[in-house]
Amino acid sequence: MSPYLIVYAFLLILATVSFFKKKDYNVLFIVSAVVLTLFLVLRYGQGSDYFSYMRLYEDAPGGMVALKGFWAKNQNIEIGWKLIEFLFQAINTPFLVFMGVVGAISVLLLCRFAIKCCPGARTFALLLAYPTLYLTYLFSGVRQGLVICVFLGLMLPFLLEKKYWQYFAVGVACIFIHNTSIVVLCAPIVILFSRKVIFLLLAGCSVLGVLISAPFAIALMNKVSDMLGKGNYFDGFSGVSWIALAERLVTFTLIAFVFFKYQKQNDDKEMELVFKIYCYGLGIYMLLCSAPMVASRMMIQIKMVEIMLAGAIIVKMPKWRLPVFVFFVALTAVMTWKNLGSYIEQGFYTCKVQNYPYVSVLHEKETIFNWRDPQTIMKTIGKRKLAETAGVPQAYLVQEKSETQSTKDRSDEYANSNPSYRGQVR
C-alpha cells in the first residue's frame, strides 16, 4: 500500500477520534504535525516539479551549475525566490537542506493556522489540508505552497485581528515569491461590501466566466494577444473542468447552507468576513473557469479558508457535525486518490495509485528512477553534472553542449515539461 495512503489513513483515524470524543487532543495534533513535517522534509524526488526546483536552485550564484545572468534569466521566477536561493547558496546549503527548511516552515505556518483559526478542530484541519495543499503545493508547487501557508498562518490571523498594516506588508512580500499572492493582497476589499453585494458580484463573475468560455470569446482574446505581442497567452482557456467545478460548487453549497444556519444563531463577525473572502475566491474561479489550471492557481489560497469554515461548523454546530464530517472525509478520500493519480501522470511514474512510492533522502538517489522516467528528468535538469548528482542513471546522461545553447535548451525543455512553469511565464 502506498505510504501516501497510509499517512492519509493515519490522519483520518486521529481526526475521527477527536471528532467522536468531541475533544481536540493536543497529543493527536502534535503527532499529526510531526508526521506531516517529516514526511515532507525527508522526501527525495517526490513532486512533479522537484527536479525543476533542483535545477533552479543550482542555477543560483554558488550553485553547482551557476547560470550566468541568473538575476535576468528564468523570468517566470520572482525575484524574491531567487534572493532566497541566493542566500541559501551563500552559506553553502545543499539543495536537500534548502527544500527541508522551506517544507518545515510551510508546515509550521499551516499548524499555526490550525491553532489560531481552527481551535477545537486542529487535527481535522490538517486532514482537510492533506489532499491538495499538502500533497500538491507543498510537495510540488513549493513557492506557491509557501505563500499559501504564509497567508493562512500569518496574513489571515492579521486580518481577523484588524492588523491591516501587517497584513499588507506580508502580502507584498509574498508577491515577490509568487505573483498569485496579488489575489490575497486584494482580499480585504470584501470588507467594504455587504453579503448581498458579494453574492451579486459572484453571480456576475459566473456569467462573465460563461461568456469568456465561448469559442468566439477565446478567439477574440487570442487575436488581441497577438496584436500585443503576447501570442498564445490564452491557450490556457481550453474548456471547463467539470469535475473541478462540481467539487467547488458542491463544497460551497454545503458550507454556505450551514454557515447561514450558524449566523442566524451567532452573528459572528469574524466568520462573516471569512465567508465573504471564500465567496471572493469562488468568484475568481468562476470568472476563469474555462482556464482550469489558471483558475485553480489563482484562487487556491482563498479556497483554503474553507478549512476554517468547516472547522468552525464541526465545533460550533452540533446538529450539523456528523453530515459535515462525513462529507469532508469522503471528499478528502476522493481528492487524495485523484491527486495521486495525477502525480503519476505528471511525474512520469510507472506505478498505480495503490503502490505510489515514497522515496526519502535516506534511500540511494537512484531509487526514485525505479518509478520515474529518467529521460524526462534528464531533459528537465539539462546539465550532466547536476543530473549525475541527482542520481540519473548513466545510460540517460547526455553530453554537455555549449553554455549558450544548453541554457536555451534547458529553458525550452523546462517550459515544455512543466505546465505550471508555462502558466507562471504568462
Image (spheres, rainbow, N blue to C red):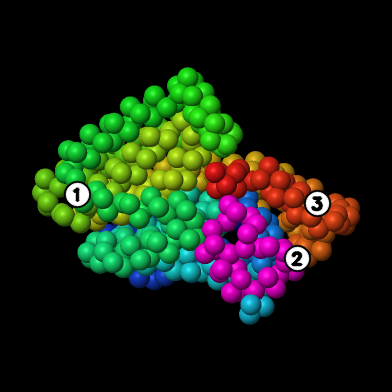
Q: Which is closer to the viewer, label 2 or label 3?
A: 3
Instruction: Read off the residue under disc 2.
Output: 65
The crowd level at tag 2 (other Cα within 10 Å; few <14, some 14-19, many 20+) is some
Hey, which quadrant is residue 181 in on the image?
Answer: bottom left
Disc 2 to disc 3, how far (Cα)? 14 Å
Horizontal arrangement in the rendering, residue 317 relative to residue 366 (left or right): left
| Amino acid, disc 1 | Leu
Q: Which mark is residue 405?
A: 3
Dot 1 or dot 2, earlier in sequence: 2
Residue 67 makes an appearance in the image = yes
Q: What is the magenta range?
A: 61-89
| Amino acid, disc 2 | Val
Residue 23: x and y in percent read 28, 63
Give the secondary structure at mark 3: helix
Dot 1 or dot 3, earlier in sequence: 1
Do labels 2 and 3 touch, CB within 8 Å? no
